[in-house]
Amino acid sequence: MSETSSSLTLPDPTPRRTTFSGTLYRGNEGMWSWVLHRITGVAIYFFLLVHVLDTALIRVSPEAYNAVMATYKNPIMGLGEVVLVGAVVLHAMNGLRIILVDAWPWATRHQRLLFWIVMGLVAALMLYFTPTHLINVFSPAEAH
Amino acid sequence: MTATIESPNYAYPARSRGRRGPNLEKAGWVFMRASGVVLVVLIFGHLAYNLLWTPGGIHAVDFGFVGGKLADPFWQWWDVLMLWLAILHGSNGMRTIVNDYVHKPTIRSVALWAIGIAAAILIILGTLVTFTFNPCPPDADLSLLPSFCADL
């Protein structure tokens, strides 16, 4: 009997009970990684549209480009850049997890562990990025 | 307790029987993964170089910095490849989300066209800007330009 005409017998998936269970689809790591991937993807997409347009101002004049870049140096925007880089890092690490889960049976079985490894890598990369960036954001501009 | 799934691969083949022509959805699936891996390298390099490894980080990003960077073919190709892959990857992701949530055919069609037109405009604009801009525009204030412009 060939592989495709047999039937598979699998244990019923048993979602972990959380305070959200019953109100949400699954409610576990797999669902949250999917939700976060969509939200971060949409957020990065809209930033990308703006970022291509602001960079295009280098073709207009140095003054026009420097004027728009000044808005990125505002401290509130600086905090927003931490959130943006966090979204990029999360989308990147979770995207690599998706590739592994698709391609490698071990990763498919251990997708829950991989979700937490992704979270750990995001935390580590943000611990590397955030202090340097915030020191730059909150240093007086004339120091550079 | 167990659940029995009857011949999953047979009941739902990856592709309907009798379809002809290239499998564009599969190509898109492969593209998202291939471009994703390359974008991790390109964007992490972009962020690390511009925001972490350049003294001053975000405060140092101005015409002099970007103009100096984009006068180098290495960064021109880095940025153009990043532009094409990011716009195509992002637009295809937005297409997936519209297909998932927009059920009215007219609104779906409008949304997909808007995504496609925005992608085309930004790819053409970004590519033209990268390869046609002048890092040392004549009549510009020399203090705003990359340092090598003073030697011209």
Image: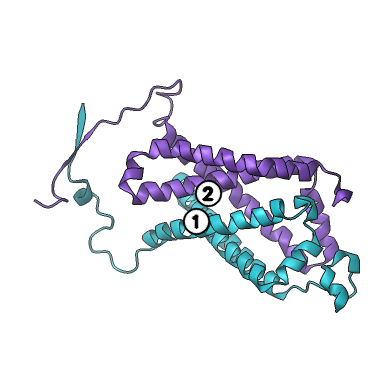
Q: Give me the chain letter of mark 2.
A: A
Residue that protrudes farthest toward the bottom in the picture: B152
Q: Disc 2 versus disc 1: distance between alpha carbons?
A: 7 Å
* Rendered view: B12 above or below A55: above
* Rendered view: A63 above or below B139: above
Residue at 39%, 49% (x, y): give it: A100
Q: Is residue A128 left or right of residue A115?
A: right
The chain drawn cyan is chain what?
B
Q: Give me the chain letter of mark 1.
A: B
- Residue A32 at what x, y percent from top left? 47, 35
| Label 1: element kind | helix
Give the image quarter of residue A51.
Answer: bottom right
- Residue B63 at what x, y percent from top left? 80, 63
Is residue A49 at least partly visible in the picture?
Answer: no
| Label 2: element kind | helix
Q: Which mark is residue A92?
A: 2
Q: Which one is nearer the viewer's eye here, B39 or B2?
A: B39
Q: Are marks 2 and 1 in contact (CB under 8 Å)?
A: yes
Give the image quarter of residue A133.
Answer: top right
Dot 1, crowdedness within 10 Å: few (<14), some or many (≥20)? many
**Which of the colour schemes (rainbow, by chain, secondary structure, one colour) is used?**
by chain
- Residue B142 at what x, y percent from top left? 90, 69
Is residue B50 at least partly visible in the picture?
Answer: yes
> In the rendering, what colour is chain A?
purple
Residue at 71%, 68% (x, y): give it: B70
Q: Which mark is residue B107?
A: none
Dot 2, crowdedness within 10 Å: few (<14), some or many (≥20)? many
Pointer 1 residue: B36
Three-letter amino acid code of the residue under disc 1:
Gly
